[in-house]
Image (cartoon, rainbow, N blue to C red):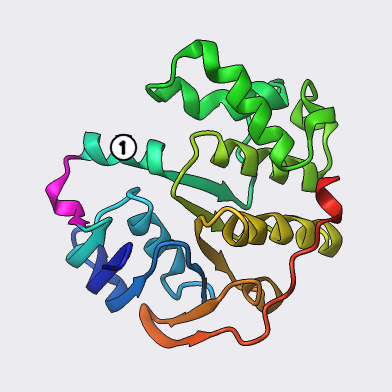
Amino acid sequence: MAFIEVENLEKVYSDGAVETPALRGVSFAIREGEFVAIMGPSGSGKSTLLHILGFLDRPTRGTYHFGGKTIDDWTDGELARIRNKKMGFVFQSFSLLPRTTTLDNVKLPLLYSSVHSSHHDELARRAIEAVGLAHRLNHEPSQLSGGERQRVAIARALVNDPDIIFADEPTGNLDSKSGQTIMEIIQRLNEKEGRTVILITHETYTAEHAQRIIHLRDGTIESDIPVHHRHEAKNHFIK
C-alpha cells in the first residue's frame, strides 16, 4: 500500500463571488522512503498541494490517504497531532524565532509533543549534531549564515523523528554553495535514514536530487517521471 495516495484532488478558493481553482483532479501515489520533487511555475498549485499533503489545509473534493487512512477519518485536532509527530517542515524563509538560540529553536516542536521535557535538550542536541551545527548551539539566528539558519530549520524538522519531511523551496534564499549543502543533507535523510521526502521547488538542479519529479501546471499534473541521474550525496559536510 502507498504511504501517500491522492485521487482526483481538487482545491477551489472562493471569496463568495468568484471561485478560483488551484488543483484540478490531481492523482498520484508516493511510497514510504521515496524522494519526490514537485515542480511548477508560480500559480501551478504546488504550494496548495503541499499544504494539503502536510495537513495544513483540506481539499475541496477528492481523497487523500495517509498511512492507509483518509484524512476525512480525523478531526482537525487529530490531524495537528499527527502532523507534529509524523511530519517535519522546512520552509524557504527558515521561520526561526529571533533572539532565540539554535538549541531553543530546535526544541520548539517538542513543546507540543508527548516527549517529557527532561529529554528535550538531548533530542535537540542530537538533531543539531546531525546537520553539523554542534558548534553553533548557543548562537541566535542573527549570528548565523543563511545556510546555517536553514540547517537549524532542518534540525527542528528532525527533532520529533518524523516519517516524512516536507521541504518548501529550501534553497530559495541561499547561494549555490549553501544550497548544495542543504540538498546533500536532505538527500542523506532519504538515502541513509529512509525518510520520505517531498520537495517543492522551481529549480531543476534542486529537483534532480529526488528520485522522481512531478510537474504541475495550472493545477494539473503535466508529467510524472523518474530521475535517471541523481546527484551523489557527499559526506564532507558532516565531519
In the image, what residue occupies the spot 73% across and 60% down?
184
Q: Which residue is mark 1?
A: 80
Amino acid type, callout 1: Ala
- Which quadrant holds residue 2? bottom left
Residue 155 lies, with reference to residue 57, above or below; the image says above
Q: Position of residue 146 (x, y in %)?
A: 79, 46
At mark 1, the secondary structure is helix
| Most foreground residue, 165 or 163 | 163
Q: Position of residue 209 (x, y in %)?
A: 65, 72
Dot 1, how many residues are within 10 Å of its Cα: few (below 14), some (14-19), or many (20+)?
some
Q: Which residues are magenta?
A: 69-75
- Let me know if residue 192 is in the magenta part: no
Residue 150 lies, with reference to residue 222, above or below; the image says above
Q: Residue furthest top?
A: 118
- Let me know if residue 71 is in the magenta part: yes
Q: Residue furthest left?
A: 73
Residue 146 lies, with reference to residue 33, above or below; the image says above
Q: Position of residue 92 (x, y in %)?
A: 63, 52
Q: Position of residue 161 (x, y in %)?
A: 50, 39
In the image, what residue occupies the spot 44% across and 49% down?
163
Q: Can residue 29 be seen by looking at this rendering?
A: yes
Residue 173 as seen in the image, left or right of residue 199: right
| Most foreground residue, 195 or 146 | 195
Q: Can residue 19 be seen by looking at this rendering?
A: no
Residue 151 lies, with reference to residue 22, above or below; the image says above
Position of the C terminus by quadrant:
top right
- Which quadrant holds residue 201? bottom right
In the image, what residue occupies the spot 49% across and 34% down?
160
